[in-house]
Image (tube, rainbow, N blue to C red):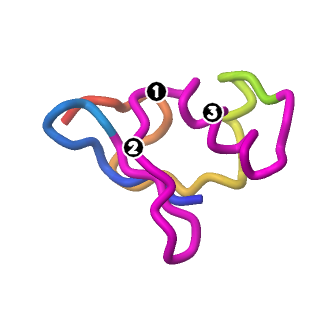
């Protein structure tokens, strides 16, 4: 899963492979994406520490440009 750099609205695009999953505004949104992918029971701390996520343009604490 790739989380792209923040846009002007503070959102970040999320992609797996060549498929764009959507836009996220925080770690909770990412936990929902992961849950849909079959990884249930993850909270925001789990998401922030996940090795499944490749952060571009800042890590899990960066949501604004």
| Residue located 75% across and 30% down the image | 46
Q: Position of residue 14 (x, y in %)?
A: 46, 53
Work out whether mark 2 precedes mark 3 in sequence or the reverse, and give the earlier one. 2
For numbered disc 2, what is the local secondary structure? Answer: strand
The circle drawn on residue 26 is 1
Mark number, residue 48: 3
Q: Is residue 19 left or right of residue 42?
A: left
Q: Is residue 48 above or below residue 7?
A: above
Q: Residues within 10 Å of mark 3 (few under 14, many from 20)?
A: some
Disc 2 target residue: 23
Identity of the residue drawn at 46% across and 26% down: 26
Q: Judge by depth and name the residue closer to the eye, 6 or 18.
A: 18
In the figure, 29 relative to 52: above or below?
A: above
Q: Is residue 15 left or right of residue 45?
A: left
Spatial CA distance of label 2 from label 3 is 16 Å
Q: Residue at x 46, y 62 (%)?
A: 20
Which stretch appears magenta? 12-41
Per the model, the C-alpha gap separating discs 1 and 2 is 9 Å
User: Is 16 contained in the magenta span?
Assistant: yes
Residue 22 position in % (x across, y down): 44, 49
- At mark 3, the secondary structure is helix
Q: Where does the C terminus fall, quadrant-wise?
A: top left
Image point (69%, 36%), residue name:
49
Q: Name above or below for residue 44 compared with residue 30.
A: above
Vertical placement of 22 versus 62: above or below? below
Q: Residues within 10 Å of mark 2 (few under 14, many from 20)?
A: some
User: Given this view, does label 2 or label 3 mark the residue nearer the observer?
Assistant: 2
Element at badge 1?
Answer: loop
Mark 1 / mark 3, whichever is N-terminal: 1
- Please state the horizontal and vertical placement of residue 38, each as a whole percent of the image: 83, 48
């Amino acid at each position: 899963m790739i989380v792209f750099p923040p846009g002007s609205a503070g959102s970040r695009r999320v992609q797996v492979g060549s498929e764009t999953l959507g836009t996220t505004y925080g770690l909770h949104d990412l936990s929902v994406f992961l849950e849909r992918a079959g990884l249930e029971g993850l909270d925001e701390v789990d998401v922030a520490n996940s090795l499944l996520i490749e952060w571009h343009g800042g890590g899990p604490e960066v949501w604004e440009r």
